[in-house]
Amino acid sequence: MNNIILCGFMGSGKTTIGMELAKIMGRKFVDTDELIEKEQGIAIKAIFAAHGEDYFRELEYECCKNVSDMKNCIVSTGGGALTFQRNVDALRTGGKIVFLDASFEVICERIGNSKTRPLFQDREKARALYDERKSKYLAAADYVVDGDMSARKTAMDIAEIFR
């Protein structure tokens, strides 16, 4: 059975919805950022600091290729992963991509003043990044779901698509 790959902006609920969806559908949950951190033995923030974004994006691409070989998984991707066509192409070989289309306002409510989200310290820059990435998520997506609802409701809606 094909993977279900979740994409969207940070705070759109990829991990929370992904875990819920995995329970509902009886599938394994996989988070690409967690896989990279586990393989590298350090946090993504530290990878960026030590090696830069280009190095991280290479790791991310390799991870996307590896995940595409997995079967029957719910996959949560990093917020920037599907803004790169090579990642989209790699992941699409192993599944269908679902864009969690959460509004910027709802994302702001969810993230709040989190210090773990450095890109969100400047809301204007975060909004510009959100606007820039949204068209890429839409282009990558096989399905688009409303990401403003509760994690349970969104997961149920996605499960219904794949029944």
Image: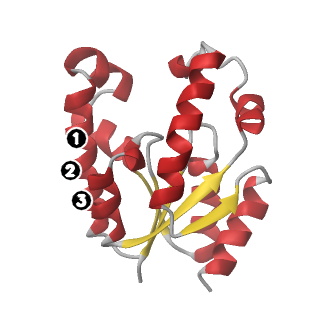
> Spatial distance from mark 1 to mark 2, Cα to Cα?
5 Å
| Disc ID at residue 59 | 1
Question: Is the C-beta separation of discs 1 and 3 under 8 Å?
Answer: no
Give the class, few, some or many, for how many residues have Cα within 10 Å of label 3's Cα (few <14, many ≥20).
some
Q: Amino acid at mark 3?
A: Lys
Q: Where residue 50 sits in the image (x, y, percent)?
A: 23, 16
**In the displayed structure, does residue 86 sit left or right of residue 162?**
left
Question: Is the C-beta separation of discs 1 and 2 under 8 Å?
Answer: yes
Q: Where residue 26 sits in the image (x, y, percent)?
A: 56, 75
**In the displayed structure, does residue 50 sit left or right of residue 138?**
left
Q: Secondary structure at mark 1?
A: helix
Q: Closest to the observer: 60 or 103?
A: 103
Q: Amino acid at mark 2?
A: Glu
Q: Quadrant of residue 124?
A: top right
The residue to which callout 3 is attached is 65
Give the class, few, some or many, for how many residues have Cα within 10 Å of label 2's Cα (few <14, many ≥20).
some
Q: Secondary structure at mark 2?
A: helix
Q: Quadrant of the N terminus?
A: bottom left
The residue to which callout 2 is attached is 62
> Spatial distance from mark 1 to mark 3, Cα to Cα?
10 Å
Give the class, few, some or many, for how many residues have Cα within 10 Å of label 1's Cα (few <14, many ≥20).
some
> Spatial distance from mark 3 to mark 2, Cα to Cα?
5 Å
Q: Give me the residue at 31% from left, 70% from top.
A: 70
